[in-house]
Image: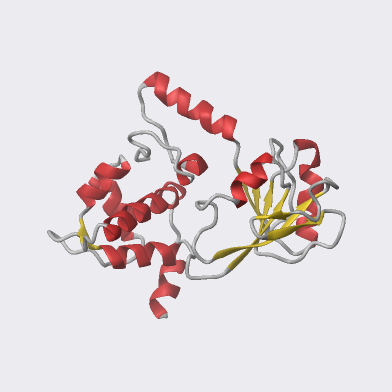
């Protein structure tokens, strides 16, 4: 238990946080193949970064690698999961069950370990009351149940109103897919996801031969190219 507390207390850089889920996927792939150890060079080649970057990133999770022998795959997977909060429980509420909302909640890659889909909301009478991903869609104009994370999948014009309602329901972590910057009170975390921006960034690196940066949601959903990450 003391190890978990220590890992969370150490602040990681944003680029490191972006790379950790990729390292974890690599470790999980190693586990499925029955392999027990992996070194920084192997991780780096698969993630598209240098071995030095891998070692620097993983050093922020504590000392668990062995010089010359690399990392125990099971421990690596556990340490990354602890750092990213996968050992905790999260209730996720999704607002806007249109094409994007449906695709997300039906995707096997949408929810991290520890996260569970709690509630779905929409304002379309034809959608309200229907079952999606095993949940009955609730009316948006009704009460919003408290959750850990609110996912905003509504048109831009409705994004601020939805964000306000989620915050008023004591939900202070928002994943915003709407093409609209929203205003939230201090203490509320917002992460913006815009597929058109992701594609523009990808095209920039493709056209300039620099290789895509960061990974982002496209990478987390399994939409990736060779050399998905680059050290920063």
Q: Which of 25 and 83 lies nearest the eye of the viewer?
A: 25
Q: How was the colour assigned to the protein in this rendering?
A: secondary structure
Q: How many marks?
A: 0
Q: Quadrant of residue 78?
A: bottom left
Give the vertical position of 91 relative to 54 (above or below): below
Q: Residue 170 at x, y = what percent?
A: 75, 64
The quarter of the image holding the N terminus is bottom left
Give the farthest residue toward the bottom: 1
Give the residue drawn at x 45%, y 74%.
Answer: 5
Q: Residue 4 at x, y = what percent?
A: 42, 73
The quarter of the image holding the C terminus is top left
Give the vertical position of 174 relative to 143 (above or below): above
Position of residue 3 in the picture relative to residue 117 (left or right): left
Give the farthest residue toward the top: 207
Position of residue 38 in the picture relative to residue 98 (left or right): left
Q: Which of 227 and 16 lies nearest the eye of the viewer?
A: 227
Q: Residue 6 at x, y = what percent?
A: 41, 72
Position of residue 41 in the picture relative to residue 167 (left or right): left
Give the residue drawn at x 42%, y 36%.
Answer: 213
Q: Residue 167 at x, y = what percent?
A: 76, 58
Give the residue drawn at x 34%, y 40%.
Answer: 231
């Amino acid at each position: 238990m003391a190890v978990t507390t220590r890992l969370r207390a150490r602040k990681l850089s944003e680029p490191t946080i972006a790379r950790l889920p990729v390292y974890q996927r690599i470790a999980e792939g190693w586990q499925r193949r029955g392999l027990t150890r992996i070194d920084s060079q192997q991780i780096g080649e698969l993630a598209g970064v240098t071995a030095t970057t891998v070692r620097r990133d993983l050093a922020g999770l504590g000392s668990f690698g062995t010089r010359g022998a690399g990392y125990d795959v099971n421990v690596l997977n556990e340490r990354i999961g602890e750092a990213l909060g996968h050992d905790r429980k999260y209730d996720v509420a999704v607002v806007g069950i249109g094409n994007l909302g449906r695709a997300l909640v039906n995707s096997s890659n949408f929810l991290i370990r520890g996260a569970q889909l709690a509630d779905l909301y929409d304002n379309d009478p034809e959608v309200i009351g229907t079952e999606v991903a095993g949940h009955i869609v609730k009316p948006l104009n009704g009460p919003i149940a408290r959750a850990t994370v609110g996912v905003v999948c509504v048109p831009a014009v409705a994004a601020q109103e939805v964000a306000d309602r989620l915050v008023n329901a004591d939900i202070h972590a928002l994943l915003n897919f709407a093409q609209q910057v929203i205003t939230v009170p201090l203490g509320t975390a917002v992460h913006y996801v815009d597929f058109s921006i992701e594609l523009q960034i990808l095209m920039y690196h493709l056209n300039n031969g620099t290789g895509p940066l960061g990974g982002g949601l496209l990478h987390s959903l399994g939409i990736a190219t060779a050399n998905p990450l680059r050290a920063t």
